[in-house]
Image: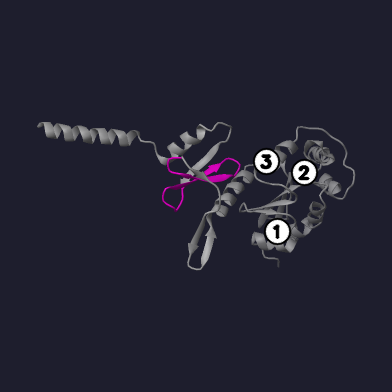
Amino acid sequence: MTPFRKLALGATIALVASSAIAASPEEAIKAKLSKLGGKVTIDRITETPVKGVYEVQFSGGQLVYSSADGGYLFRGDLLKIDGNKWTNLTEQARSKALAKVIDGVPKEKMVVFSPEGKAKSHVTVFTDVDCGYCRKLHTEVPELNKMGIEVRYLAFPRGGKQSPAYSIMENVWCAKDPKDAMTKAKKGQKVAGKKCDNPVEEQYKLGLQVGVSGTPALVLADGRLIPGYQPAENLAKLLGVKNK
């Protein structure tokens, strides 16, 4: 073999070897973010339709965008323009991630009001028993059930552990009949004090993690987060449930 061919072969082998060990964008981004410290867990990294830009999804639903080498991060909404219309790709990704987080909460840890027969859809409500609009929404739960909508409650005492609502909600979740206790609490009636291993603190922290700042906060079946009260009829439209 001539010296030239040896040199060319050596260069080819070196190129192949360097390509084999070169970090993928996903690995590079993870490596870069790991140096920031903290306990943030990356759920997934996916390439966006924009070349060289990657979506970094954290556990809990938050997301950012990154350059392929992880050297640049930026926040904001990525919009796709198609003719005279635009689609918010970030909002779609955010909703999908939130739906996954909420679906990961066992129904046994929620206070659930189910319709008769098979549910057409569901809404998860971060609620506070002392919240006026939460109480108003609760009066419409029977109407929502009649339309085939299941209402799932998660605890979110806005004032935190020190608030009176926190202990009341512990009583609700520990009650023999949580649904009855929830209805009483929403009416301002006394709920018998009872202690148990309950998820109130866990759900309150979850609410903070996913961006809940007030109540009621409604998470639709597809993961869209709707802040504030919605009348039953409006909620049914948002869920795509026809009110016959």
> Quick one: label 3, few (<14), some, or many (20+) residues within 10 Å?
many
Give the distance between the C-alpha atoms of the residues marked 1 and 3, in whole angstroms: 27 Å
Q: Nearer the viewer, residue 243 or 227?
A: 227
Closer to the eye: label 1 or 3: 3
| Residue at image location 77% in from the left, 43% down from the top | 158
Q: Earlier in the sequence, mark 3 or mark 2?
A: 2
What residue would you read off at disc 2?
158
Q: Which comes sooner in the sequence, label 1 or label 2?
A: 1
Separation of marks 3 and 2 at Cα, in angstroms = 13 Å
Q: Secondary structure at mark 3?
A: helix
Residue 4 locus on image (x, y percent): 12, 34
Three-letter amino acid code at the position of disc 1: Gly
Q: Position of residue 13 (x, y in %)?
A: 23, 33
Quadrant location of the C terminus? bottom right
Q: Magenta segment, which residues?
A: 47-70
Mark in front: 3 vs 2: 2
Asked whether disc 1 touches disc 3, contact meaning CB atoms under 8 Å apart, the reply is no
- Residue 94 placement, left or right of 229: left
Q: Nearer the viewer, residue 66 or 242?
A: 66
Residue 82 shown left or right of residue 221 in the figure: left
Side of 29 relative to 159 (left or right): left
Of marks 1 and 2, the one in the foreground: 2
Mark seen at residue 206: 3
Q: Which residue is mark 1?
A: 148
Callout 2, which amino acid? Arg
Is 162 magenta? The answer is: no
x, y percent for residue 146: 74, 60
